[in-house]
Image (spheres, rainbow, N blue to C red):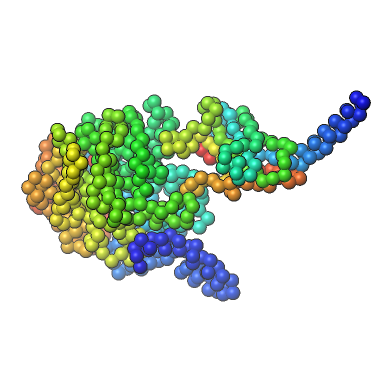
Amino acid sequence: MQRRQLLKNIAGASTCIGASSLLMSVPFAVNAKIVNKNQIDPLANIKTSFADALKDNPSLLGLKNTANNFAHQQLTIEGKLPKDLTGVFYRNGPAKYEQGNQRYSHQFEGDGMINSFTFANGNIVHQGKFVETTKFVQEQQQNKFLYSGPLSDIKNSRKVTQADTVNTANINVIPVDDEIWALWESGSATALDATTLATKRRVNLGANSQYGDKLKGLAFSAHPKIEANGDIWNFGLSLSGHVALYQLSSKGLMKNVGIINARYRGKMLHDFLITHKHILLILPSLTSQADRSHSNLKLFASIEYDSKQPMRVLVIDKQTLTLKKQYELDAGFAFHFGNAWEENDGTIHFDASINDNFKVMDELSEIMSGTAKNLDQNSPHTALFTLKPNGGTTKVVVDGDSEFPRVYDHLVGQRNKTLYTLSHTQSQFWRDTVCCLNMDSGKKDTFIYGDEFIAEEHIIISNTAKEGDGYLLGTALHIPSKRTCLNIFSANNLKGGPICRAWLPYHLPLGLHGNFKAS
Amino acid sequence: MKTLFIAIMTTSMLLTSTHALANNVTFIIDDIKSDQGKVYVQLFQGEKNYQANNAYLSSIAIAKKGQITITFNNLEDNDYGIRYFHDENDNSAMETNLFGMPIEGYGYSNSAKANYGPVEYQAIKFQVADAAVTNRSTINY
Ligand SMILES: [Fe+2]
């Protein structure tokens, strides 16, 4: 079966199978329950299948449904906790995958949970709380899914009148002024209390600005770029193929908004980049079938990878928010980019964790039923691109796989010499290695956790504006002991291993992205 | 002659009013969130007119928190659909965000709701034929 076809079959299953089962269930009333369980509701099958798979494969632990919030819990520290590391490390990711007897068919559909690790007084204290989106609150009250997601089909779904109706706030979290914002990519940000993690409101991007309510409900993507001066840059994709561009102050006040008609049909755009002068929208080689409202295809299943469609780079002026130049690159798909910077002559450099297919979307669906075979085969790799003022481009592929690229905060949009990523070494399934790539020498400084661990995104924390200073910080799930640990490395010596490791007595759901708010 | 004219007029009025009583539409909107501004209501006859944005009748009601009722009288036998919005800031236009999505309350007859796309006429239409009709809708904000 073609992988693209797989997603479509999952999305269409309830209508196809539903009709025939209905006919069967009348004369064979005794079998109704079995028919119901095995055929009518694919989401119930996914739940059963995952539970079975988990028995044989304990590494699926991190994708178990999370039922409740996590209360405050002090971590057990091994090694020496650096004294200059104070603040809060926030992480976000899907955690609520199941309601009743149903389990979502894609990892990205799970409701978001914020996990915070507070570093103070020589201790680290964790807490975890679900983002109380309107969707989450309604579904929790009824203990069932009420809305069809981008892939899962919920029978008698309530109507999705706007994207925020199904906002799960599950991708990233950034500190903004004295709040934190939980980010999704198809709708509004959600503001939370930075201390209690209590949900405060859906962010109205234009509030207290000249834009008023004009930005209400617009998509605010999950990978904002925060410049050294504190300005927050971001974009939001409309399904029409238009992209809104935002410049906000560090306090979250909207300063400037522009709209570009990117004529992008891919319907999914996850990340972007800035240089000191420009915004780069890098449009992967995705396209989509006919307008979703006129077909039964779910959003995720309607997106196709087209190897004949070049990736496009739109270079947008940061002052005027207007399109200045376009480049075409080899076909490709990337969720994430590390950084971009620009030379005096206008030459632009950027990196991408790139792939020549979109199979990851199917794998993140298969993984929900515990049926994915391996995840390393299609893992992306780092590619370094150069865009020349004369229109020419170059691409250099770095050996080995890589994802979750990060650079020093003070270098966002400026020349970076180091790039921190995750990759696979011993494990065919999960990422188990952290790596620092020196972009000048090509040398790598790596630490292999090994296949007993699942390493998550690692971020750089530094009190200085000098690459190599500070720490690399990230969570990892230790499979045999079913616990999550926090790992602190010297940023310039990953191979030396963590200088400090702090353990929770239990595991957390595997998450996506996070950031640190120093204090 | 004058008497006759009055007689004819009276008869025709009677006939008209009898017919009008039968073909009245009472449209009830629930969950209006404030007394601010007005509610603009448009009645469309048939799918073509709906798509062409060509209203058969329009009505403007003063907004009232909770429920308001609008009536359309004396309609021809046909199918109809209703669309409305709550012009809370009283600027005579439905406010939309920069992507064109409504940011003021709106709704449709049959309480039809958009679902990952626009609302089709089929979802909002109702028949009017020789009987009074009541149709309800809950506003979406
Ligand atoms: Fe991401």
Residue in the image at 65% along x and 35% along y: B57
How far across and down, in percent of the image, does residue A310 sit? 27, 50
Residue in the image at 47% along x and 48% along y: B116
Which of A40/A95 is in front?
A40
Residue A1 at least partly seen: yes
A450 up-or-down from A436: above or below: below
How far across and down, in percent of the image, does residue B115 sit? 50, 48
From the viewer's perspective, tell me whether residue B99 is left or right of residue A393. Answer: right
Residue in the image at 39% along x and 42% along y: A238
Residue A218's quadrant in the figure?
A: top left
How far across and down, in percent of the image, does residue A176 sit? 30, 35
From the viewer's perspective, tell me whether residue A275 is left or right of residue A157. Answer: left
Residue in the image at 46% along x and 38% along y: B101
A20 up-or-down from A516: above or below: below
Which of A302/A420 is in front?
A302
From the viewer's perspective, tell me whether residue A210 is left or right of residue A424. Answer: right
Quarter occupied by the N terminus of chain B: top right
